[in-house]
Image (cartoon, rainbow, N blue to C red):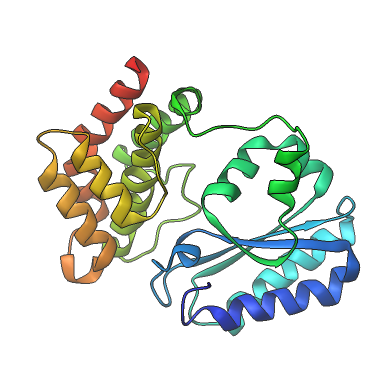
């Protein structure tokens, strides 16, 4: 179920997609914080994925750009609209996107094309140490960029508010990278923040203060009052420890 307060923006985006793509549109998934009821009103993005029967035309691509701007301007509850439309053939070849949708999304419209492709025998990722190891160079580069006061590739943009930027870092470096660490340990359950923090505490020693801080930033970033630069300094030893553990797994 879509998080309360964000239903209308998802509904309107789907209405527009159906109006434009008609029966070409086979499925719609919503990912990110909205899909797990962890979004913040006015600050979180809409991460929207639609899959169509054929390839995108130039007209389709122009329509998507225009519609993202329209949705972003119409709804104050989101900080940005990301409308990702792909063909089924492209999804068939993109096993990482299928993995992410399988484990971190809500099917909002249509058939579960991800499960259908996986069941048909398409090569797919499993939540294990091999996947965690494969993406480790990318994760290390993102951490390096964050510590150098650059927006890492894993984040579309950092909010101007430093406290909200700290929350972006917490979502990526603690929740996402924490989930991949748990995969390497064979104890991954989900990307939900309460579950990830709980499992991280169970599978690490000496980092409870970092994890408690991260959970506070995730829940109440403005009340916590920490800037993203200070936050990444605090959590860096833990994140580097996770990366080293993944490498040794």
Examine the image and state in which quarter residue 217 appears: bottom left
At 74% from the left and 52% from the top, the residue drawn is 113
> Which quarter of the figure is the C terminus placed in?
top left
At 45% from the left and 24% from the top, the residue drawn is 137
Q: Residue furthest top?
A: 248
At 31% from the left and 45% from the top, the residue drawn is 174
Residues 234 and 124: in front is 124
Residues 213 and 229: in front is 213
Q: Is residue 170 visible?
A: no
Examine the image and state in which quarter residue 120 appears: top right
x, y percentage for residue 148?
31, 37
Relative to 109, does residue 125 appear above or below in the rendering? above
Number of residue marks: 0
At 76% from the left and 77% from the top, the residue drawn is 16
x, y percentage for residue 216?
20, 61
x, y percentage for residue 234?
16, 43
Q: Is residue 9 left or right of residue 54?
A: left
Q: Is residue 76 visible?
A: yes
Relative to 105, does residue 94 appear above or below in the rendering? above
Relative to 6, does residue 60 appear above or below in the rendering? above
x, y percentage for residue 147?
29, 38
Q: Is residue 108 left or right of residue 152?
A: right
């Amino acid at each position: 179920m879509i998080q309360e307060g964000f239903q209308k923006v998802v509904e309107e985006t789907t209405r527009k997609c159906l109006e434009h793509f008609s029966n070409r549109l086979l499925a719609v998934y919503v990912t990110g914080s909205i899909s797990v009821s962890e979004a913040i009103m006015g600050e979180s993005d809409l991460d929207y994925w639609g899959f169509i029967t054929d390839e995108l035309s130039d007209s389709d691509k122009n329509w998507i750009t225009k519609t993202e701007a329209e949705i972003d301007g119409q709804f104050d509850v989101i900080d940005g609209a990301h409308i990702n439309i792909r063909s089924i053939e492209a999804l068939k070849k993109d096993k990482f996107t299928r993995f992410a949708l399988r484990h971190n999304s809500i099917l909002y419209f249509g058939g579960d094309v991800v499960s259908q492709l996986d069941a048909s025998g398409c090569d797919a990722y499993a939540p294990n140490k091999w996947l965690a190891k494969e993406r480790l160079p990318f994760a290390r580069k993102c951490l390096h960029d964050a510590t150098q006061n650059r927006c890492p590739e894993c984040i579309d943009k950092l909010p101007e508010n430093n406290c909200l930027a700290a929350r972006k870092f917490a979502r990526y470096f603690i929740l996402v990278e924490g989930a991949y660490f748990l995969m390497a340990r064979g104890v991954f359950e989900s990307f939900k923040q309460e579950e990830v923090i709980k499992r991280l505490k169970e599978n690490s020693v000496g980092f409870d203060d970092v994890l408690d801080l991260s959970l506070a930033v995730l829940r109440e970033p403005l009340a916590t009052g920490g800037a993203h630069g200070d936050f990444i300094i605090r959590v860096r030893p833990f994140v580097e420890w996770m990366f080293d553990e993944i490498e040794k797994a």
